[in-house]
Image (cartoon, rainbow, N blue to C red):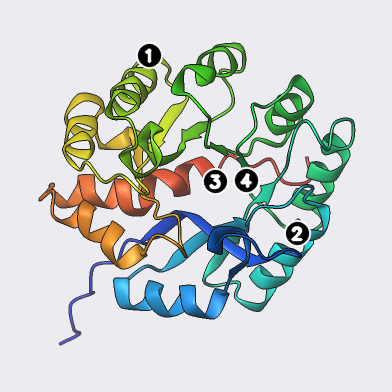
């Protein structure tokens, strides 16, 4: 008698991981993010893949090439995202981002600076998601309203390391207002807002992230596990949602 088929394991994907090196040594998070150390912690946490992008630079063309090379060495474990500065790289981002996605294989965009029309038009053309860490949650409103076809992931549930609980509340409200806004869980210290986000928005709007390597993925995934969600909801947060967003990439079209 044939053995019963085993249920397929759902992928666990960290949407928020920095990799690579910088040219100047300042703070730890702007100096080095070792892929080998990240993979070791991913293995210990049970994370199958991570979306990876550069640490801080003034401009990102070279850093994005480094990320693409790291992904090529670990194609089963890493998904590459570009990173850009819409101000310092003004006028060049459209051409660079298309090349980075279609030739280097990058699948998303990480931002800290508010995106310009140049950035948003290119992202809409490519069909990639934006993981954006804004100075204030309110900055999301205009971009999300003006570009409803773009999927925006609001980093850190709106407030890195829960520096301002009011920004967590604003982020939940923002994701509830706009169908194309999702929340990344990375670095949320006040875990009551993770629970509130799932309860208010549903699991479909929450995307697991850690902010590796400075924030440990082994702790960040525990914050999701400890919520005690039904399996289907937990699987959406831990991988299903980001897979769906990544699946909208238009490739060479």
- The residue closer to the viewer here, 189 or 43, is 189
Q: CA distance from mark 2 to mark 3?
A: 21 Å
**On the image, numbered disc 2 is attached to which residue?**
63
Residue 19 lies in quadrant? bottom right
**On the image, numbered disc 4 is attached to which residue?**
108
- Mark 2 or 4: in front is 2
Decide which of tag 2 and tag 3 comes sooner along the chain: 2
Decide which of tag 4 and tag 3 comes sooner along the chain: 4
The answer to whether residue 35 is left or right of residue 237 is: right
The residue that appears at 57% across and 38% down in the rendered structure is 129
Q: Are marks 4 and 3 in contact (CB under 8 Å)?
A: yes
Instruction: Describe the element under mark 1 as helix, strand or loop.
Output: helix
Q: How many marks?
A: 4
Q: CA distance from mark 2 to mark 1?
A: 34 Å
Instruction: Describe the element under mark 2 as helix, strand or loop.
Output: helix
- Mark 2 or 1: in front is 2
The residue that appears at 65% across and 32% down in the rendered structure is 113
Q: Which mark is residue 246?
A: 3
Q: CA distance from mark 2 to mark 4?
A: 15 Å
Decide which of tag 1 and tag 3 comes sooner along the chain: 1
Q: Residue furthest front?
A: 26
Q: Which mark is residue 177?
A: 1
């Amino acid at each position: 008698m044939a053995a019963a088929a085993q249920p397929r394991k759902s992928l666990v994907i960290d949407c928020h991981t920095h990799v690579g090196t910088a040219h100047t040594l300042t703070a730890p998070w702007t100096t080095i993010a070792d892929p080998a150390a990240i993979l070791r912690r991913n293995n210990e946490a049970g994370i199958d893949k991570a979306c990876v992008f550069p640490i801080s630079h003034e401009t990102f063309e070279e850093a994005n090439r480094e990320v693409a090379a790291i992904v090529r060495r670990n194609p089963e474990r890493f998904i590459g995202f570009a990173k850009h500065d819409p101000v310092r790289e003004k006028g060049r981002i459209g051409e660079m981002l298309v090349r980075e996605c279609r030739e280097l294989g990058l699948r998303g965009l990480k931002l800290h600076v508010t995106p310009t029309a140049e950035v948003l038009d290119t992202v809409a053309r490519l069909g990639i998601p934006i993981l954006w860490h804004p100075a204030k949650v309110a900055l999301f409103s205009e971009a999300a309203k003006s570009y409803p076809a773009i999927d925006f992931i609001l980093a850190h549930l709106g407030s890195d390391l829960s520096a301002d609980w009011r920004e967590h509340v604003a982020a939940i409200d923002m994701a509830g207002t706009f169908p194309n806004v999702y929340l990344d869980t990375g670095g949320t210290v006040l875990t009551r807002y993770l629970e509130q986000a799932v309860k208010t928005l549903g699991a479909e709007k929450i995307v697991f992230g850690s902010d590796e390597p400075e924030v440990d993925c082994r702790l960040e995934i525990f914050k999701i596990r400890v919520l005690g969600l039904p399996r289907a909801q937990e699987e959406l947060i831990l991988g299903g949602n980001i897979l769906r967003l990544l699946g909208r990439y238009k490739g060479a079209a």
